Image (tube, rainbow, N blue to C red):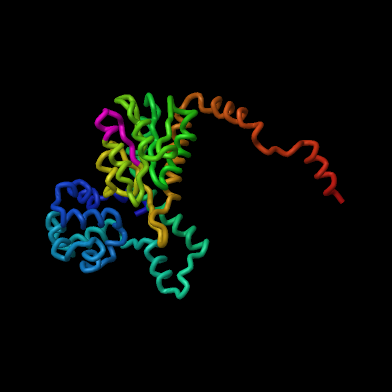
C-alpha cells in the first residue's frame, strides 16, 4: 500500500461515490468501512455488523449493491486492495485492554502518532493537495475554521498563513460559534474557507461550511475520511489519520498536514524570503539570544 492512495483505491472510491445514494441501513455500513478500512479487512461479518450498528443482512446488501458477491466479495476486495494491513492502533488498543493497569507508555503513543502519519500518507491524493494550495494562493481572503479542539489548530494555521496570503482570518477561538458565524458573514466567491473537522464532528462547522458554499466560496477540508460530513461539502479534502486507543481523536497527523499546507503556500509566494526576514526582524527583540560577550566568557571559563 505504500505506493497507492488509500481512498483512491477502486473499492473505497466505489463506496465513497455511492454512499449518499444508499438506503440508511446500508449507508451506516458504508460509513464505517470508509472510516476504518484497515480494520474491516480483518473483521468477520458479525463483527462488522455490530461495529457499524447494523445487521449482517445490511452488510450483505451493501456488498451486492456494490456489485460484489456478498460480504465474502467485499472482504476479498478490501484484502486485495489493502494487502491485509492491520492498523497498529487497533493492535495497541487490544494490548492495552489485556493489561491489568491499562497504562499507555510514551513509546507506544509515539507509535500511534507514527501510524496516523503513515495512514495519512497512504490516504493522500497530490491533486487534491495541489488544488488546495492553488485556491489559498489566489484567494482574496482566507478564512480558517475550527471549532472545539480544532479551534487551536485553526488558530495556529491562520497565524502561520497570514504573512503569505492576501488576508488570513482565524475563526472559532474568540467568542465561540456565534462569533465565528458573524466573522464569516462577508465571505464571497473570491474567498476560501479552510475548515478543520475531526471526530467528534462539530455540527456548527458543517453549517458554516454549507453557508460558505452558498455564498460561492471555495471550501477546503482537513478531516479524517471521505465518510466525514465535511467531505460532502468541500470541493477538495485532505485526510488525516486520527485513531487513538484512548483519545476521541488524535491531532498529530492533522497538524502535520496543516503545516504542509502552510509550507507549500509559503514557498509559492515569490516574496517568501523577504517576508520571513521581516518577520524575524520584527520579533527579534522578544527572543532570548545569548550575549556574544557572555558566551565568550563562558567558553573561556570552561577551558582547563
Q: Position of residue 299 (x, y in %)?
A: 81, 44
Q: Along the horizontal axis of the image, is 118 left or right of 5?
A: right
Judge by depth and name the residue closer to the eye, 175 or 93: 175
Q: Residue at x 29, y 41 (%)?
A: 206
Q: Quadrant of the N terminus?
A: bottom left
Q: Position of residue 174 (x, y in %)?
A: 44, 37
Judge by depth and name the residue closer to the eye, 150 or 137: 150
- Vertical position of residue 74 compared to residue 13: above or below: below
**How many numbered circles does the render carry?**
0
Q: Position of residue 158 (x, y in %)?
A: 45, 35
- Vertical position of residue 1 compared to residue 124: above or below: below
The stretch in magenta equals: 211-221
Q: Along the horizontal axis of the image, is 107 left or right of 12?
A: right
Residue 262, quarter of picture: top left
Residue 196, quarter of picture: top left
Q: Is residue 120 among the parts visible in the rendering?
A: yes
Amino acid at each position: 500500500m505504500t505506493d497507492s492512495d488509500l481512498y483512491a483505491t477502486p473499492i473505497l472510491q466505489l463506496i465513497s461515490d455511492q454512499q449518499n445514494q444508499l438506503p440508511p441501513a446500508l449507508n451506516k455500513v458504508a460509513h464505517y468501512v470508509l472510516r476504518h478500512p484497515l480494520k474491516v479487512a480483518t473483521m468477520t461479518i458479525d463483527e462488522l455488523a455490530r461495529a457499524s450498528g447494523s445487521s449482517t443482512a445490511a452488510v450483505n446488501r451493501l456488498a451486492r449493491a456494490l456489485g460484489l458477491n456478498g460480504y465474502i466479495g467485499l472482504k476479498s476486495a478490501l484484502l486485495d486492495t489493502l494487502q491485509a494491513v492491520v492498523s497498529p492502533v487497533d493492535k495497541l488498543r487490544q494490548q492495552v485492554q489485556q493489561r491489568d493497569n491499562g497504562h499507555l507508555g510514551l513509546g507506544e503513543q509515539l507509535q500511534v502518532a507514527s501510524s496516523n502519519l503513515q495512514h495519512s500518507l497512504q490516504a493522500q491524493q497530490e491533486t487534491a493537495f495541489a488544488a488546495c494550495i492553488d485556491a489559498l494562493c489566489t484567494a482574496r481572503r482566507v478564512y480558517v475554521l475550527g471549532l472545539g479542539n480544532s479551534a487551536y489548530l485553526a488558530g495556529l494555521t491562520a497565524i502561520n498563513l497570514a504573512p503569505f496570503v492576501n488576508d488570513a482570518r482565524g475563526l472559532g477561538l474568540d467568542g465561540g460559534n456565534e462569533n465565528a458565524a458573524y466573522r464569516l458573514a462577508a465571505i464571497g466567491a473570491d474567498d476560501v474557507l479552510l475548515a478543520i473537522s475531526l471526530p467528534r464532528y462539530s455540527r456548527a462547522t458543517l453549517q458554516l461550511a454549507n453557508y460558505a458554499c452558498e455564498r460561492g466560496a471555495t471550501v477546503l477540508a482537513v478531516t479524517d475520511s471521505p465518510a466525514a460530513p465535511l467531505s460532502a461539502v468541500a470541493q477538495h479534502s485532505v485526510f488525516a489519520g486520527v485513531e487513538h486507543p484512548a483519545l476521541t481523536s488524535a491531532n498529530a497527523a492533522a497538524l502535520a498536514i496543516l503545516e504542509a499546507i502552510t509550507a507549500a503556500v509559503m514557498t509559492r509566494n515569490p516574496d517568501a524570503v523577504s517576508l520571513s526576514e521581516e518577520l524575524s526582524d520584527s520579533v527579534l527583540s522578544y527572543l532570548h539570544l545569548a550575549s556574544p560577550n557572555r558566551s565568550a566568557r563562558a567558553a573561556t571559563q570552561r577551558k582547563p
